[in-house]
């Protein structure tokens, strides 16, 4: 897998610590053929800045993005995965959490909404999976 590094060394340490303290959700995106680079570019432009604000505030403990090096079978195929570790479960499911930052980062909300609509039109499927770390001793 190709790792898109969005973490500073300090954030990487937080990611390792969050395995014990946070609530983690893996977000999978399956994109129309040949459009994954475009989707990732739009994600980095429109969604990642919001997540960085949550990271700065401490509501999100880590952000990790990955893309596969090769494709798997179509039944299990995905093009882009983002693993978010939130401070707690309540924050993970608070869908209004980015609202104040959206208004700050994107003063032209209509243009932002149009760009996000287009980003989602590039998708074939999207799913989110809450995961837990297991202690193996």
Image (spheres, rainbow, N blue to C red):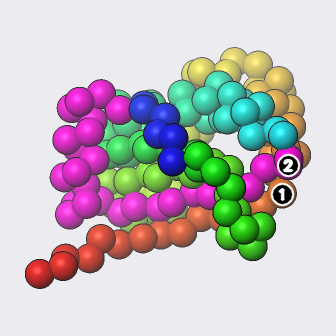
Mark 2, residue position: 32
Q: Looking at the image, which residue is at 21% across and 32% down? A: 10
The answer to whether residue 55 shows anywhere in this view is yes
Location of residue 6 (image quadrant): top left
How dense is the environment of label 2, judged by Cα within 10 Å: few (below 14), some, or many (20 and up)? some
The secondary structure type at the circle numbered 1 is: strand
Q: Is residue 100 left or right of residue 3?
A: right
Location of residue 118 (image quadrant): top right
* Residue 94 image label: none
How dense is the environment of label 1, judged by Cα within 10 Å: few (below 14), some, or many (20 and up)? few
Total labels: the figure holds 2
Residue 24 colored magenta? yes
Mark 1, residue position: 124
- Which residue is at the front of the view, 50 or 94? 50
- Which residue is at the front of the view, 35 or 68? 68
Q: Is residue 108 left or right of residue 56?
A: right
Q: Which residues are magenta?
A: 7-33
């Amino acid at each position: 897998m190709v790792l898109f590094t969005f973490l500073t060394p300090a954030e990487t340490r937080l990611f390792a610590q969050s395995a014990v303290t946070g609530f983690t959700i893996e977000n999978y995106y399956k994109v129309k053929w040949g459009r994954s680079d475009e989707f990732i570019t739009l994600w980095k432009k429109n969604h990642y800045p919001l997540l960085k604000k949550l990271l700065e505030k401490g509501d999100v403990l880590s952000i990790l993005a990955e893309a596969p090096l090769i494709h798997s079978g179509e039944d299990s195929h995905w093009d882009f995965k983002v693993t978010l570790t939130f401070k707690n479960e309540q924050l993970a499911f608070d869908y209004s959490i980015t609202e104040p930052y959206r208004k700050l980062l994107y003063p032209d909300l209509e243009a932002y909404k149009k760009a996000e609509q287009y980003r989602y039109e590039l998708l074939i499927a999207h799913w989110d999976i809450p995961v837990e770390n297991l202690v193996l001793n």
